[in-house]
């Protein structure tokens, strides 16, 4: 039986910690594709294409424990990565709609089951890869869908953490982005001699533990937004009886125990107020057609394509940096290629943990000075003390924080694009770091922007729609990959130049946010001016009546100083 919302609130730290760990191990692990690709090639997935096409030397036999590798094999396996990464983002739209309606619990149960099934399918296909290699497409589809279910359902959990909501949200995004380190870790275990099939079966069993944790701890209800949460304390009064051993007298001591409780805030019937229903009255189409959302689509689509292409083509890019485009490398050079590609892909995968460390920074930027802001639901009838210092406008502060976050992210993205143009392998370590930071930052920025600007009941749908559109745009990475390994002979330079130019469009969103913030400031200034003039008009008659009353009272006092006969 699912726990209640109040029980889930008491378990919120357990749920948050386990969600972070589960995101690390089971969410977007497919983004560590470079390490998985090496293991799939070593296990012989689609190696029969190399024998049939005779694109490589056939002196390597299965009996020696090695399989053939060729361009045809890499292209079809990269197609599997394209499908899986597409589902990892594209299914967020229906997931968002379903989660807004049914809550995160059923989707999380389905996601953990799908991930367990994907690992089981990969393990099964490894027994006979020549016949069962086709299962890799179904497996990566289940992997991507199951991973995004776990990620997406964890994004509403920060609603339980009040003022640090965006910081916790950024940690969730960081654990999602850092999950790309999982396959490099699996490859490290694989290189130690552990069977690939055993690893996949154990991983499938661990996913079943995620299913059990969700079944026991996640509530059936959706997590309410912070402005809809009612926090209170349940006080219990109990008596403790103590007995004096010398006199035998008994004393009763009363002890109070407080417990944190949480429930959904009920609207007060006598104070409906337009501001209380402002978020509920906003239609979804208004949020979808807003310029902020449309500009975020442009920014996220181009950024996703830039990041996904680099991850999918990483091994071929590293290979080109070692061979410098030599179509017929010697055996010694080919051995160096294998060593360097394996080494640098492992480093790239390990660096994904930086997402977990750096995402709280962007969350801190999004939460900057929010505690100094006035509440959005304060009614106009609320009287403020003249001695109270003026507070910051919450909407303006949210936009200011979002502008800073997107500017920092886009500067790092452009810097990454410039460094990726340099034909030097050790320098690419810097691009690895920047790629990892940007991938964590951009999701946190976008999620934080939607959480800050739009109603809470639109968050899932808007995030899902944005992920779907950006995932569809990122499908261009497959033809770009084919263009690179084919016409460009493995040279990624011109593709990187084109993507760098596109990346500059990411600054359009913070520019519009600055323009929108200026309009809000003007509107607030005009509103305050009108309110001040209206208040002055209302106070003017009162001032006149007060002066008239004071004058009449003075006259009556003067008259009372004399007697009726004219004497004092």
Image: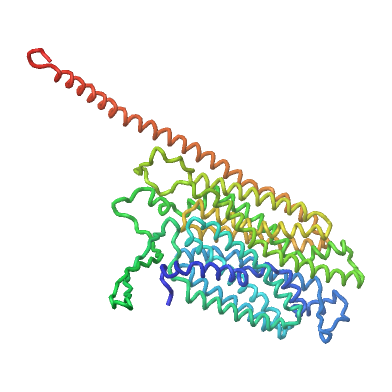
Q: Position of residue 163 (x, y in %)?
A: 49, 55
Q: Is residue 163 at least partly visible in the picture? A: yes
Residue projecting furthest to the top: 566
* Residue at (82, 65) in percent of width and height: 319
Measured as percent of width and height from the top left, residue 168 is found at 55, 60
Which of the two residues, 334 or 363, is positioned nearer the viewer here? 363
Residue 76, x across and y down, in percent: 73, 72
Q: Is residue 555 above or below residue 221?
A: above
Image quarter of the N terminus = bottom left
Q: Quadrant of residue 101?
A: bottom left
Observer-nearest of 314 and 54: 314
Question: How many numbered markers are drawn?
Answer: 0
* Residue in the picture at 73% in, 82% down: 194
With 220 as the anchor, is 316 left or right in this view? right
Q: Is residue 430 left or right of residue 260?
A: right
- Image point 55% across, 71% down: which residue? 18
Q: Position of residue 203 (x, y in %)?
A: 63, 79
Q: Nearer the viewer, residue 109 or 405?
A: 405
Q: What residue appears at the point 61 percent right and 65 percent down from the top-left corner?
A: 176
Q: Is 2 in front, or is 420? A: 2
Location of residue 37 with respect to 197 vertically, above or below: above
| Quarter of the rendering occupied by the C terminus | top left
Q: Quadrant of residue 171?
A: bottom right
Residue extending furthest toward the left? 565
Colour pattern: rainbow
Is residue 149 at all visible to an observer of this figure? Answer: no
54, above or below 469, in the image: below
**Residue closest to the far bottom:** 63
């Amino acid at each position: 039986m699912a726990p209640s919302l109040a029980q889930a609130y008491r378990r919120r730290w357990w749920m948050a910690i386990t969600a972070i760990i589960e995101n690390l191990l089971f969410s977007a692990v497919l983004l560590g594709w470079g390490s998985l690709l090496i293991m799939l090639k070593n296990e012989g997935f689609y190696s029969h294409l190399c024998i049939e096409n005779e694109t490589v030397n056939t002196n390597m036999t299965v009996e020696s424990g090695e399989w053939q590798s060729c361009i045809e094999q890499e292209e079809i396996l990269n197609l599997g990565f394209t499908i899986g990464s597409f589902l990892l983002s594209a299914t967020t739209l229906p997931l968002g709609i379903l989660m807004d309606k049914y809550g995160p619990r059923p989707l999380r149960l389905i996601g953990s089951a799908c991930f367990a099934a994907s690992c089981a399918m990969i393990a099964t296909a490894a027994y006979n890869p020549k016949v069962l290699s086709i299962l890799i497409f179904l497996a990566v589809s289940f992997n991507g869908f199951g991973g995004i279910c776990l990620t997406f359902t964890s994004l509403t959990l920060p609603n339980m953490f009040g003022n640090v909501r965006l910081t916790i949200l950024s940690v969730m995004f960081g654990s999602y982005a850092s999950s790309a380190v999982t396959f490099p870790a699996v490859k490290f275990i694989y290189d130690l001699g552990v069977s690939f099939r055993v690893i996949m079966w154990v991983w499938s069993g661990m996913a079943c533990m995620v299913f059990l944790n969700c079944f026991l701890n996640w509530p059936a209800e959706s997590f309410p937004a912070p402005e809809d949460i009612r926090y209170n304390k349940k006080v219990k009064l109990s008596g403790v009886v103590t007995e004096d051993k010398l006199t035998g007298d008994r004393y009763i001591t009363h002890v109070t125990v407080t417990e944190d409780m949480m429930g959904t805030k009920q609207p007060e019937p006598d104070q409906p107020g337009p501001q209380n229903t402002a978020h509920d009255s906003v239609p979804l189409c208004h949020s979808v057609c807003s310029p902020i959302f449309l500009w975020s689509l442009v920014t996220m689509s181009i950024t996703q394509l830039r990041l996904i292409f680099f991850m999918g083509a990483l091994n071929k890019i590293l290979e080109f940096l070692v061979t410098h485009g030599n179509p017929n490398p010697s055996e010694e050079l080919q051995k160096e290629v294998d060593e360097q590609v394996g080494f640098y892909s492992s480093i790239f995968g390990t660096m994904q943990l930086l997402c977990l460390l750096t995402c709280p920074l962007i969350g801190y930027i999004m939460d900057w000075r929010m505690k100094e802001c006035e509440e959005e639901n304060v009614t106009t009838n609320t009287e403020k003390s003249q001695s109270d210092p003026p507070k910051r406008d919450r909407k303006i502060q949210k936009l200011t924080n979002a502008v800073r976050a997107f500017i920092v992210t886009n500067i790092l993205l452009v810097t990454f694009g410039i460094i990726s143009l340099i034909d030097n392998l050790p320098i690419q370590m810097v691009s690895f770091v920047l790629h990892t930071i940007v991938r964590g930052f951009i999701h946190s920025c976008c999620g934080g922007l939607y959480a800050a600007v739009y109603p809470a009941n639109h968050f899932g749908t808007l995030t899902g729609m944005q992920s779907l559109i950006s995932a569809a745009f990122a499908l261009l990475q497959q033809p770009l990959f084919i263009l690179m390994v084919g016409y460009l002979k493995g040279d990624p330079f011109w593709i990187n130049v084109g993507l760098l130019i596109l990346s500059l469009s990411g600054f359009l969103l913070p520019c519009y946010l600055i323009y929108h913030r200026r309009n809000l400031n003007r509107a607030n200034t005009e509103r305050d001016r009108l309110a001040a003039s209206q208040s002055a008009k209302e106070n003017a008659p009162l001032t006149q009546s007060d002066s008239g009353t004071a004058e009449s009272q003075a006259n009556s006092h003067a008259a009372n100083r004399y007697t009726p006969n004219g004497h004092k």
